[in-house]
Amino acid sequence: MVMRRLRHDPVAIVSGALVVAVLLGVFAGAPLAEHLLGHGPDAIFLGSIPDGVPVGPFTRVPNHDQAYTHFNGTTLFVLGADGNIGRDELMRLLYGGQASIEVALGATMVAMLIGVTAGGLAGYFGGLLDAVVLRAIDFVMAFPIILLAIALGSNATGWLGSLTAGGLLRPGVPGLAVFIGLATWFYPARIVRVSVMSLREQEFVEGARMVGASHRRILLSHLLPHLTGPLIVYGTVVFATNVILEASISLLGVGIQLPNPSWGNMLSTNFGTLINLGSSEYTPPTIWTAIFPTVAILVTLVATVMLGEQVRRALDPRGR
């Protein structure tokens, strides 16, 4: 029934297609583009910054290494150069998307695991455990994660940077994912706690207790299935929040460290050059260096949240 509803939902189809396109683009398209263009995201092309201004999209520049000559000694910059160093904006956008999505997914898994466990136990057992979890939620909610990241510097996110799962994860991703996950678990915890407090008084839970079901069985087999819809929606919201948090922390220079790209530190490459009228020498704005990562973040967030909402509606047995 759920799959039939999703197949007939144009919003779910479009948003799902966008999510799949983003994932395929950053994880499968990045190595393919590197093979076709002959250079990676960290390759520097000094010929791409004539007069100190990065070249625009669809520009050919002299190749930095003649061993990778594809266009008679030149290289095509599909989206232009990223800044005053002269790196390929397209390659950094694709590989930066890998880091941003890995951070957001990892942080979402950490936040959902802690939040669902803490909220479920607090809502089911109540009493002292509920009071402790509530105080922990209040403390984490009141703590400014951005200021904490700035105060701790790159050490806040780099302490797990050496753990890259055999090269499957980008450098710095594990530490930043854990850091964000520990700061955002209160979102699902509050929702799960309230939902479990309401469900634990229902007749089917009382019936399970009467036949001798253990607390573990009641939580996993009777209560958790009722939370599937809200958790899917809240998981997408937490994912979207984590994408923004990664971009904000990396924009401030304490997240994914250069030269490793992410959508956040890509925005910081030419921060403030869109309107640069305060300097003595006017520097032409490099609009594309801000537009492309911003559009990538926007498309990812909107598509993910819309898909989560449509899945929740499809899971609702009372929905049409």
Image (cartoon, rainbow, N blue to C red):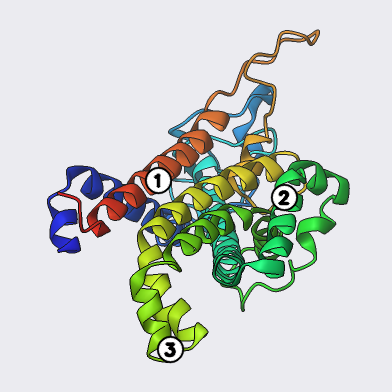
Residue hosting label 3? 213
Circle 3: residue type? Ala
User: Is 191 rendered above or below residue 217?
Assistant: above
Q: Which of pointers 3 and 1 lies earlier in the amino acid sequence? A: 3
- Left or right: residue 91 compared with residue 139: left
Q: Residue at x 61, y 29 (%)?
A: 54
| Neighbours of disc 2 within 10 Å: few (<14), some (14-19), many (20+) | few
279 or 9, which is in the foreground? 9
Residue hosting label 2? 138
User: Is 189 rendered above or below residue 248?
Assistant: below
| Rendering coords of residue 90 (x, y %) | 49, 44
Instruction: Choose mark 2 or mark 1, whichever is in front.
Output: 2
- Left or right: residue 189 compared with residue 142: left
User: Is 15 rendered above or below residue 220?
Assistant: above
Q: What's the CA distance linking mark 2 and mark 1?
A: 26 Å
78 or 136, which is in the foreground? 136
